[in-house]
Amino acid sequence: MTDLSYDKSLHLKELIPQSEIDEIDCWIKKYPNDRKRPPIMPALKVVQENNGNYLTTEMMQAVAEYLDVPHVAVYEVATFYSMFNLDKMGRHVLSVCTNLSCSLRGADKVVEHLQNRLNIKLGETTKDGLFSIKEVECMAACGGAPMLEVDKIYHENLTEEKIDQILSEMAAKDLPTQEDK
Ligand code: FES
């Protein structure tokens, strides 16, 4: 017999603060009651941001229970969209587009330069936890190919010099300030 008293929010409440659940509720309210799947993406975004930029299987399950959708529906969204990470990532995620326009304009050189500069391969994170490099599909900035996204900012028409500058700026942001010492 179905336990009608089961609270579907219990699992998610164990994983994220109430304020984040309130945010997910705001998204749920934007859609008709019978449309349970559209809030999956914003819910995953909220959960991921609360968890250092990646999702665990348990988190995806908790979101599915909360939204009352099959686990696989949440998993499909999390694996289809490159904005979601299923592994622990560095503080700065360098998402390099390797789709057609970027490939034709030298995305392979961008990847090679990043790998050499950071001494990691695609999909890896530097030992200090500062940078991860990730390969992504078209990010709708083909006019500025080759491009990459770092911390939600697009960098286009990349050259090796531009990439070096981006890395230096990112590293400088993480240097300890006087107040940190
Ligand atoms: S192909 Fe790279 S942004 Fe479109």
Image (cartoon, rainbow, N blue to C red):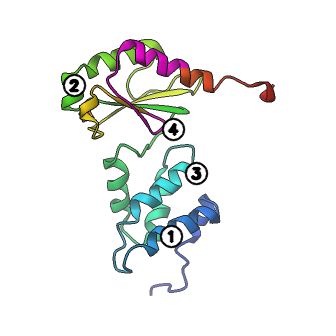
Residue corresponding to mark 3: 50
Residue 74 on the magenta segment: no
Asked whether the residues under the numbered discs 3 and 2 touch, taking CB atoms below 8 Å apart as contact, a structural biologist would say: no
> In terms of image quadrants, where is residue 86?
top left
Name above or below for residue 124 compared with residue 118: below
Stretch in magenta = 150-168
Residue 88's label in the rendered image is 4
| Sooner in the amino-acid sequence: mark 3 or mark 2 | 3
| Sooner in the amino-acid sequence: mark 4 or mark 2 | 4
Residue corresponding to mark 2: 103
Distance from the alpha carbon under mark 3 to that under mark 2:
33 Å
Residue corresponding to mark 1: 26
Work out which quarter of the rendered image holds the C terminus and state it.
Answer: top right
Name above or below for residue 49 compared with residue 19: above
Crowding near the residue tagged with mark 4, few <14, some 14–19, many ≥20 C-alpha atoms within 10 Å:
some
The label nearer to you, 3 versus 2, is 2
Ligand 1 rendered quadrant: top left
Work out which quarter of the rendered image holds the N terminus and state it.
Answer: bottom left
Residue at 34% over, 21% down:
158
